[in-house]
Image: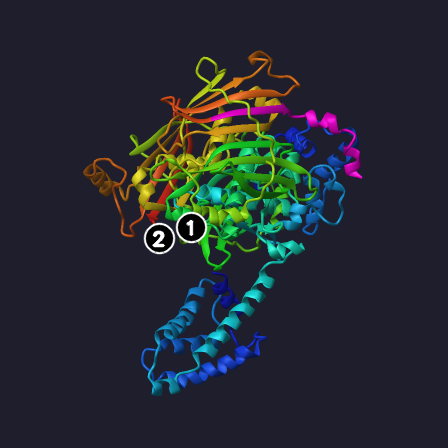
Amino acid sequence: MVATAATSAFIPVPSPSPDSGAKATAKKLSNLGGMKSKSAGSSGGLQVKANAQAPPKINGTSVGLTTPVEGVRNECETSSPPPRTFINTLPDWSMLLAAITTIFLAAEKQWMMLDWKPRRPDMLIDPFGLGRIVQDGFVFRQNFSIRSYEIGADRTASIETLMNHLQESALNHVKGAGLLGDGFGSTPEMCKKNLIWVVTRMQVVVDRYPTWGDVVEVDTWVSPSGKNGMRRDWLLRDYKTGEILTRASSVWVMMNKKTRRLSKIPEEVRGEIEPYFMNSAPVVEEDSRKLQKLDDNTADYVRTGLTPRWSDLDVNQHVNNVKYIGWILESAPLPILESHELSAMTLEYRRECGRDSVLQSLTAVSGTGVGNLVNLDDIECQHLLRLEDGAEIVRGRTLWRPKYAKNFGTLGQVPAESS
Amino acid sequence: MLKVSCNVTMDQIALAQCGFLGRPMPLPAFTPRRKAAVSGRPLSKAPVLAVVSDRGGLGRAIVSGSGSLADRLRLGSLTEDGLSYKEMFVVRCYEVGINKTATVETIANLLQEVGCNHAQSVGFSTDGFATTPTMRKLHLIWVTARMHIEIYKYPAWGDVVEIETWCQGDGRIGTRRDWIIKDCATGQVIGRATSKWLMMNQDTRRLQKVSDDVREEYLIYCPREPRLAIPEEDSSSLRKIPKLEDPAHSSKLGLVPRRADFDMNQHVNNVSYIGWVLESIPQEIIDSHELQTITLDYRRECQHNDVVDSLTSVEPVGDAEAVSKLQGTNGSAAGMENKEDLRRFLHLLRLSGDGLEINRGRTEWRKKPAR
């Protein structure tokens, strides 16, 4: 795709070409014209000549420009071995190909400089924030700017936004490492064996939520988890200040997507992914307290009739993991949401659901009980997301801190920041 | 310039400015600086930096001549003549739907984002509501009246799209904002959109004519000659949308707004309505077709405890002809095809309880391209 656009931006050959090779090619092509008319079925060559001399339109006609080139390439592949007498009248295809490649590369370079005006040096490496591998190949880093529609009611990025960024950076890591088999984080060997990763556990700790316009730098890496699991960690920082905003850690196991049974990591897959495993401690200390299962009696708040919308579904028409968090919070009591912000969350994923599922979200407030919600202490809640028939989808625990708690703590630091 | 979110009181604007990091009140030392930033800024094209420095949290207001980091890294900017704004976006994995391509809601969100950023970059209401200073003084806000989006080719995960947007006056009472979406890699236009906005007094909730002083404030940023993303002859963006007949062919009842649907003023985000409209499209259309065009007329706002019904019917071709054809089918919405193999539907969103109309819509669907 890039090469295509490069061509459209670069040709007409005669005027802006800095590459003398290209001019030579143009002459050569015009010579070709005469020869080509003799041989049969080589309209590709003729077309190349014509286009080289005519300045093409840029909009949407890049397809037209590629076709003759591809025609040339196809000719090359099929014209072997030609009869001896024929060879003498054929143009030098290898020279032609080399020239075309040079044009493409030069054009790509020029296109990159024209259209992207990098404002920072690392923009050249990662202009669209697609991420890159850092730190000896183990850590993947990607920047996200918080968009206006990603912020919640209190003008900060919602927890769903942050989780979405985690998901995106994880996929881009797999892609950047060249291990993307099918677009869902399955490596090529996994695809062959019908294996997929499923998340079983997620822990997130938020120190500060970013706001609209902030740029968040996400670092992510993988480590082994037990014999047959994988752990993926994330560290989110404010790009400008380096302040740590969020830490997250997740555990994944392998499952056969046909049988839906858990699987050991096969040797071939191990060979693919082990080179990328770091051996670091989890970025979030594991909260090993058991998550209790709520029921109608133990829950303080219940929200029923939750149904997935089209936009909640992924390609397999399963609900995206991140959406569960939104549903969990649906039954969180409004007073807590208004006075507190989510500071930590532990989730255990048990089952997935699809388009036709109808879910219920249950919440129980630990400790102080329902009567004393508006206070200045941290609040802990237990959660359950289940289907109407009782089948569990997600169990969770959340910790909430008062929204303005940090202010009182950091009063001393604020004036320094303002200079 | 254009409101992209819903109502906001003056208090909330001030609060938003001051309380950007979630604090309820500004610390006294910083209040004067912030208030000056809110009200007295002279409008001009040049100082992108000065404007943006007001938007962030503490500390950014002081950085002179450099703007916020996001602004420097932002992949968007005013075009050279200052009359439109372009920005590039990469499609993220979670913005992609069942077709492996961006959903129409993603596109709508990006349109909203770039509209916001345009208003920011020319210095209008730095809190993101795109009101001119005079409007703020008079408690006026923009409300969306109509949104029309056409998508010719949906981008996939990792694709980069460039969206250009501009606005201009639209008669005496409204403004319009137009967008063109291009695929960065090919330069092809993959979508177009237009929207109509009206001015409303946020206290009385009554529509108001755009006064001359307001018009002057934003007209300097608009193209001088009418520039339409969708040329006039292709007027489905202007066509009136009839109310669909009862009973509808297909429906989804009892839709409830989620927390994520609400903006900071507890009104449902414009884009959420699109999701609701799509909820009552029959499964067989979703499986075989993709959305080509959607037109939505916004009539009434939806609040927290409202419950919404989404209704869909096949759009009648012509009066008598339509009736006989409809009676011929068994009422299923997978009914009529027209010459171009497009399926056309009419939509209605209404409150469950009293049936009050929230939105009217029309959609066109084309067969999914073979992959």
Label 1 crowd (10 A; few <14 / some 14-19 / many >=20): some
In the image, which disc is placed on residue B292?
A: none
Q: Which residue appears at 45% of the width and 62% of the height?
A: A60
Q: Which residue is nearer to you in this view: A261 or B346? A: A261
Q: Amino acid at mark 2?
A: Arg
Q: Position of residue A95 (x, y in %)?
A: 48, 79
The magenta span reads A395-419
- Report the chain holding disc 2: B
Q: Position of residue B212 (x, y in %)?
A: 61, 43
- Report the chain holding disc 1: A
The answer to whether the residues at label 2 and label 1 have Cβ atoms under 8 Å apart is no
Distance between the alpha carbons at the discs numbered 2 and 1: 20 Å
Badge 1 element: helix
In the image, which disc is placed on residue B371?
A: 2
* Residue linked to disc 1: A188
Q: Which residue appears at 66% of the width and 19% of the height?
A: A376
Residue A19 part of the magenta segment: no
Q: Amino acid at mark 1?
A: Pro
Q: Position of residue A125 (x, y in %)?
A: 61, 56
